[in-house]
Image: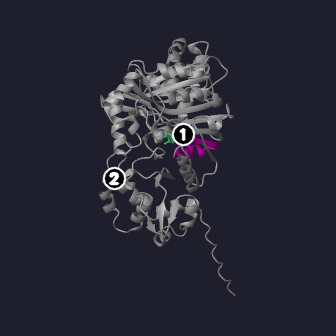
Amino acid sequence: MSQPAPSPEPYTGTPADLRRILSDAGYMTEAVPKLARLAPMGSNVDPEAIRAALAEPTPPNLLARLFYAAQPLPRAQAESLLAPLGCEPLIAAGLLRAEGDTIRSVGAVVPIANRLCLRDFESWATGMPMQEDYVLGVGLATTMLAGFTVRRAGERVLDIGTGQGFQAMCAAEHAAEVIGTDINRHALDFAAVSLRLNAIDNVRLRHGSFFEPVAEERGTFDLLVSNPPFVIAPPHDLAAIGGRWEGDRFVQDLISTAPEFLRDGGYATILCNWHHPSPDEPFARPLSWINGRGVDAWIVRLKTDSPETYARQWLRETAAGNGQAAMTAAGNSLEHWLDYYKRLNIGAISLGVVYLRRRAAGGPNWSRTDSLSMDNYTGHASSQAQSLFDAETTLRSLPTEEAVLDLRLELSPAAELAQRLALDQGAWKPRQSLLRETAGFEFAVGLDGLTTQILAALRPDAPAREHILALAKSMRADPQTAIRQTAPFLARMLKLSHVRVAGR
Ligand SMILES: C[S@@+](CC[C@H](N)C(=O)[O-])C[C@H]1O[C@@H](n2cnc3c(N)ncnc32)[C@H](O)[C@@H]1O
């Protein structure tokens, strides 16, 4: 006798099912790219063009009306589009609101890097200017910082100014616990919804300014990450990008206080603007903020603008995003902004990333500054930053430069050698060899035949000295000369992160 077929399990979906539902309906592949084309970030958008593009009632268009263009849908239609999950779990999660027979989304749902991120609708969608508590989406600064951040497994992480929660969500993937703080309750509400939509349960959100929400937790964080409100502008109301802090005061207080909250060995990764009196001394102010605070520091300057270029850029961006309503206190005139800079003796404004690592023992703290370009950045700088901190600390602890050869060294796993060959008497011979990193900053350097062989000879099984002596012997070179000449080369390779101390 045949057994009756088992009855299917009842569907018990969660808000995290929304991603698959949106994906199956073509929201990610059709609607979002179309809208990104019609409404690129920081540009003026024609709402009529968007309405026209979403006119045909296909599933991706209807979902885009709901989750991108701030339009309500009839409840029955929303239920069917969001089946089998339906509206109720998303109302309970704080994403949808029922208004009579219609359903609305509280904000825009943007898919980014395998996650759904909730942000406030853009002004073109609502017809409203940004309010003081406007929640920005994942922008260029957000993704830049996510790529720069030092990441280690099992950490306790603090994300100051979590906003829509993107940094906290990225950290949640490798951390044991993440605390995301913000002064903006509306942002924390949105971040909480995003956590539910992505089934993330190791992030705690806390309300408060600056370090207030973690005041009792000094010295407990393995990582502090922050994309602070760093825009340097005359005082205004848009908390997300600066608000009422004078000059770069927020960034200064954040960087100088961060060390107190790190465990020994804990890192901070902070993306920010800072100002300086003239273009020729970009690092003096940020260095003064961390001096004597028990941290090693790597400050990377990515660009420096004149006050006028900087002001023009922000006036343009806030006008395009309809942010001027919230920034009216800052005034819309270039002259007003330039007067403000003059009063604060601001001659140039830099953008950069500040890495800190708390280190209590093992010699005096060090700081290093680099001026690098995003053109030479390949993403995912975590491993490089950690190698670089280890290298700087180790090199400074050596009694002599030659002692670098007593270390077990290995080539960075992200190192890549590109060779250009030229035809020479019927055979292809290397003309130029370029070593670069394929993760983090490239730090490209030209190598010759000998230095490529030195790098290839390094192995973590024994101190570098043994491998260099073996190489010298095989080349019939004088061992003492080989040792003397190789030491500065290896120190340089360590500093550029092409070589690292093995086993760290
Ligand atoms: C540029 S947004 C960064 C948002 C998000 N972390 C990211 O990477 O995109 C800066 C955030 O800092 C928050 N903020 C502003 N002033 C603050 C303060 N005094 N204390 C804590 N957070 C603050 C803003 O509300 C905003 O969410």
Binning the other alpha carbons within 10 Å of mark 2 as few (below 14), some (14 to 19) or many (20 upward) gives few
- For residue 161, the mark is 1
Q: Quadrant of residue 295?
A: top right
Camera-nearest residue between 211 and 300: 211
Q: Amino acid at mark 1?
A: Gly
Camera-nearest residue between 428 and 43: 43
Judged by depth in the image, the label closer to the viewer, 1 or 2, is: 1
What residue do we see at 32% from left, 53% from top? 38
Q: Point out the image quarter for the C terminus.
A: top right
Disc on the earlier residue, 1 or 2: 2
Image position of 362 (left or right of 55): right
What residue do we see at 61% from left, 25% from top? 408
Residue 467 located within the stretch drawn in magenta:
no
Task: Give how far across and how far down residue 125 sits, in percent.
Answer: 38, 55
Q: Is ligand 1 less than 8 Å from the beta carbon at label 1? A: yes
Q: Where 408 sits versus 159, above or below?
A: above
| Residue 501 visible in the displayed image | no
Residue 171 located within the stretch drawn in magenta:
yes
Camera-nearest residue between 176 and 42: 42
Task: Give how far across and how far down residue 456 sits, in percent.
Answer: 51, 29
Q: Quadrant of residue 181?
A: top right
| Residue 253 visible in the displayed image | yes
Q: Is ligand 1 less than 8 Å from the beta carbon at label 2? A: no
- For residue 37, the mark is 2
Q: Amino acid at mark 2?
A: Arg
Image position of 377 (left or right of 191): left
Where are the magenta residues, as a range?
Answer: 164-182
Separation (CA) of disc 1 from disc 2: 29 Å
- For residue 86, the mark is none
Task: Give how far across and how far down residue 160 sits, in percent.
Answer: 56, 38
What residue do we see at 59% from left, 28% from top? 257
